Image (spheres, helix red, strand yellow):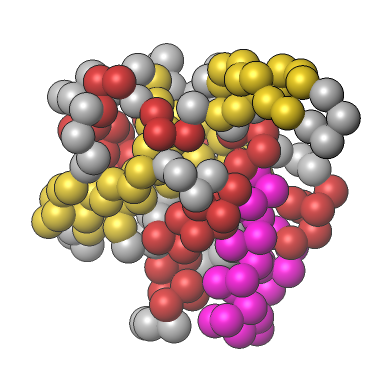
Amino acid sequence: MGNLHVIDHPLVQHKLTLMRQKDVSTNGFRQLLNEISVLMSYEVLRDIPVHDIDIETPLESTTGVVIDGKKLVFISILRAGSGMLDGMLSVMPSARVGHIGLYRDPKTRVPVEYYFKLPSDLHERDVVVVDPMLATGNSAVAAIDRIKEYAPRSIKFVCLLTCPEGVAAMQQAHPEVPIYAAALDRELDEHGYIVPGVGDAGDRIFGTK
């Protein structure tokens, strides 16, 4: 489906199966999401900018490769996106972090922005947007609309789960933005939840109802 990349590594799929179970604890769900975020980051950051440096090993001089970490920004769509940040940052601790607060109007399902804070000089940086669910796609599209106002070098979107409806919405609004997901689920239900899904990711991360 266009720019959709499903990360089907056995470890990712194993942990996702554990997360899907309705009786997993809040702590267990949170920890599994963190672990999956770490694993997914390897694929998401495969083409991250790097440069060569000269170094000294105990035996001789050589050339090594280091990441331009200061040019990377993780942007969390609040609140559930925070559940993926720690995993990503454990792999790239030098990255900067931004937050976009959006909630979905329960009647219209249209996203409403209540918080927006991004690092400076975004036009010099590569952006990775994180949100566990790409469901209707409305929040992701709205967030990327706002991010594009600051003209970053590139944008990627990372989620735990998506569905055909969410992918279609993203590809229509932002066809150049690659989507990384652990699974492409069947569909949205009448309430706008991904099925079979994991339920409400935010509630399961934070133990709320």
Instruction: Give x and y (percent) for residue 163.
Output: 53, 41
Q: Is residue 187 visible?
A: no
Query: Magenta stretch containing residue 39, yes or no?
Result: yes
Vertical placement of residue 107 versus 64, above or below: below
Quadrant location of the N terminus in the rendered image: top right
Residue under the image location 68 percent in, 73 percent down:
21
Instruction: Give x and y (percent) for residue 104.
Output: 24, 56
Vertical placement of residue 158 versus 204, above or below: above
Residue under the image location 19 percent in, 34 percent down:
120
Q: Observer-nearest residue: 117 or 95? A: 95
Vertical placement of residue 141 versus 101, above or below: above
Number of marks in the rendered image = 0
39 with respect to 78 (left or right) = right
Q: Observer-nearest residue: 152 or 65? A: 65
39 with respect to 132 (left or right) = right
Residue 202: image quadrant is bottom left
Q: Residue extending furthest right? A: 59
Instruction: Give x and y (percent) for residue 6.
Output: 66, 35
Vertical placement of residue 149 versus 160, above or below: above
Q: Is residue 151 visible?
A: yes
Quadrant location of the C terminus in the rendered image: bottom left
| Secondary structure mainly formed by the magenta segment | helix
Residue under the image location 57 percent in, 55 percent down:
90
The magenta segment is 16-40
Residue 73: image quadrant is top left
Instruction: Give x and y (percent) for residue 60.
Output: 83, 24
Residue 146: image quadrant is top left
Residue under the image location 16 percent in, 48 percent down:
116
